[in-house]
Amino acid sequence: MKAVLALLFAAVMLVACQTSTVVKDIHMASDTAYGPDVMAYYAVFTSLSAQPFYSTTVGYGFKTRYVGPSKSMISQAWSYGKQLQFSGGLSAKVPCYLLPCSPTREDTGVVSMDEADFVAAATKGFDFELAGKAGKIVGRIPAHAFRRVLDLKLTMKLPRCPVICSTAAKPNRLPSGKEGFDQAKAESDQEVETDAEGEILLQM
């Protein structure tokens, strides 16, 4: 019995680890830190799960997965009067393996967040509403799901400043010796000249 419980616990922990990790995409040159997949809303025949993330290419947000008896037709995301960018994903029928069963559909999407809202959500959680032609659904993501993403982000290698930044910051070096002195004097003569009273006049 203890062995069975140990295997069950290991399986649950393995699934949890798989849903909260950093995924690397070598083709798109991006790294994405995923928090745990949590239940944001649950009813008898309807559920909404959410998974916060941070991507080096698209920024902060969370994935949504709606399961219900009909299409959600979600097209908008809101949080206390602030509209968030929502991108719809896949919409498909969920297979029915046990009869009798009612028709069930699965709709996925992505909600984008700015960094300030994401960091605040890591302390107090995040309440939101998804809306569409079929109605509305209100959900809540607990704070620990966002904190996990921020913890994983600390382990990621974030994109560095492009090469142009480092090259632009480097000053132009003048040649050494008499050649450098003559070049510096020529550049100075092109910029300004002085009149007899010492007033600086700009070269035209």
Image (cartoon, helix red, strand yellow):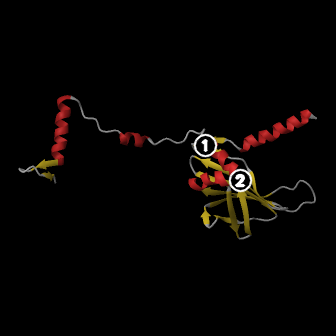
Q: Quarter holding the N terminus?
A: top right
Q: At 91% across and 34% down in the image, what residue appears? A: 2
Query: For this view, does 169 lie left or right of residue 83?
Result: left
Quadrant of residue 40 within the rendered picture:
bottom right
Residue 132 numbered tag: none
- Frontmost residue, 65 versus 83: 83
Mark in the foreground, 2 or 1? 2
Query: In the structure shown, which secondary structural element does the residue marked by tag 1 occupy?
Result: helix
- Frontmost residue, 127 versus 17: 127
For the residues bearing labels 2 and 1, Cβ distance under 8 angstroms: no
The x, y position of residue 162, in whole percent, is 45, 42
Quadrant of residue 86 within the rendered picture:
bottom right
Q: Which residue is mark 2?
A: 142
Point out the residue furthest to the left here. 196
Amino acid marked by disc 1 = Lys
Q: Which residue is mark 1?
A: 153
